[in-house]
Image (cartoon, rainbow, N blue to C red):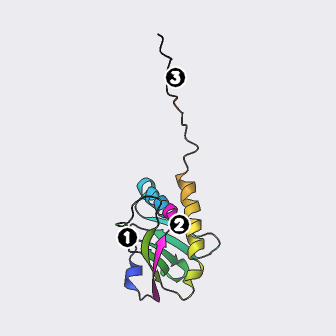
Amino acid sequence: MFTRHDELPVYAYRQSSVDAAFYNHVQLAFNRLGKELRLHIPGLKTLDLILQADAWIIVDQAFNDMPVAAWADFDRSGRAGLHQPVPCRLRLFHAHADLILQRTLEAMDEQLLQQLDTSGDQHKVLRFPEKKPEQD
């Protein structure tokens, strides 16, 4: 388990929230692919995203997985439905980390959807039997 985001000093803290679709896709990926995932962020050469139950951490491989930003302290308690965003605390370890946050979440979502895609599987739709009109 990656813990450097808990050990290093934080540049800034922010109250934030994660869009429901992003959060739900990550939870589905945890159930199907494993409890800790590491994804490369396309277009950002040395940055990866580590997904864990307690935090989603952007790390820089070139600096021995130094955290750049982390979404942590997810508060699911006030969430009344799957469509609602999940409040969290955003930890920024770099002054310009906020410039890549949205791009990272979108790249994460795209990669997770590709990995979770089961369209190649054979599915069959079952029809309900037709109801015959009653005869008098």
Within 10 angstroms of label 3, few (less than 14), some, or many (20 or more) residues?
few
Q: Is residue 86 left or right of residue 104?
A: left
Q: Position of residue 72 (x, y in %)?
A: 41, 75
Type of amino acid under label 2 = Leu
Q: Which mark is residue 39?
A: 2
Q: Quick check: 80 above or below 72?
A: above
From mark 1 to mark 2, how far is it between C-alphas?
A: 23 Å
Q: Give the residue at mark 1.
A: 75
Callout 1: helix, strand or loop?
A: loop
Region rendered in magenta: 10-22
Of labels 3 and 2, the one closer to you? 3
Please, is residue 124 above or below residue 50 in the view?
A: above
Q: Which residue is situated farthest in the left direction here?
A: 77
Disc 3: which residue: 130
Image quadrant where one finds the N terminus: bottom left
Amino acid type, callout 3? Glu
Q: Picture quarter containing residue 111?
A: bottom right
Which element type, helix, strand or loop, lies under badge 3?
A: loop
